[in-house]
Image (spheres, rainbow, N blue to C red):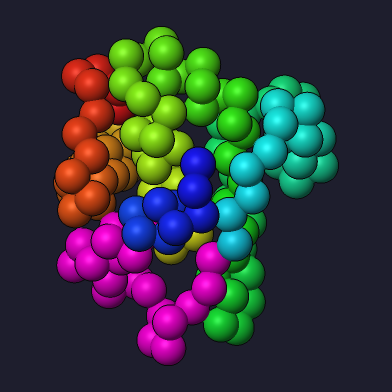
Amino acid sequence: MAPAFVRRVLDRAAQVPEIAARVPEGGPTVAVRVTSDEEMAALNRRYAGEPHATDVLSFAGSGDHLGDIAISWPAVVRQAERYGHDDATEAALLAVHGLLHLLGWDHATAAERKEMTRLTEDALARSRIKLTPKRL
């Protein structure tokens, strides 16, 4: 996954009006780390108290740094295969998902899940990325 690809996806996602309204003025930064299941499990255990790997984690930043997004590359590959799309599509989905969390969205309730799904699909559409049915 090329850094330029992730940057383009996140930049275009930030053009969705609802997302743009939450992006701080002045061009904040976001760091994206692509890592292993093992590191994701360690991060999830340390920061969320969950004893397992996950596909994406977000960590809030401060000042001009919006935050960090960690993505498990093995999860990208597994999930892309499971849902029948390419790795880039899955990586873009996880990057946008992480960005939405950094900006305050969550998916704990059905209404929140519906809103995050809508925003994710709108954000990905700006990069001409379409998810396979039933991915979200």
Q: Position of residue 50 (x, y in %)?
A: 72, 30
Quadrant position of residue 84: top left
Task: From this view, report whether residue 122 is shown above or below residue 131.
Answer: below
The answer to whether residue 31 is above or below residue 50 is: below
Residue 103: image quadrant is bottom left
Q: Quadrant of the C terminus?
A: top left
**Residue 86: x, y in percent?**
36, 25
Q: Position of residue 111 (x, y in %)?
A: 26, 39
Q: Is residue 104 visible?
A: no
Q: Is residue 21 above or below residue 42?
A: below
- Foreground residue among 124 and 62: 124
Q: Nearer the viewer, residue 85 or 64?
A: 85
**Seen in the image, is 70 located left or right of residue 8?**
right
When asked about the image quadrant of residue 72, the answer is top right
Residue toward you, 15 or 4: 4
Q: Is residue 26 magenta?
A: yes
> How many discs appear?
0
Residue closest to the far top: 82
Q: Residue at x 54, y 66 (%)?
A: 30
Task: Provide residue 99's location: percent of width, then percent of height.
Answer: 44, 55
For residue 90, side relative to residue 66 (left or right): left
Question: Is 99 colored magenta in this rendering?
Answer: no
| Residue at the image position 59 percent from the left and 31 percent from the top | 73
Residue depicted at x 27% and y 61%? 12
Extent of the magenta region: 10-30
Question: What residue is rendered at 63% in x and 69% in y?
Answer: 61
Residue 96 in view of the camera: yes
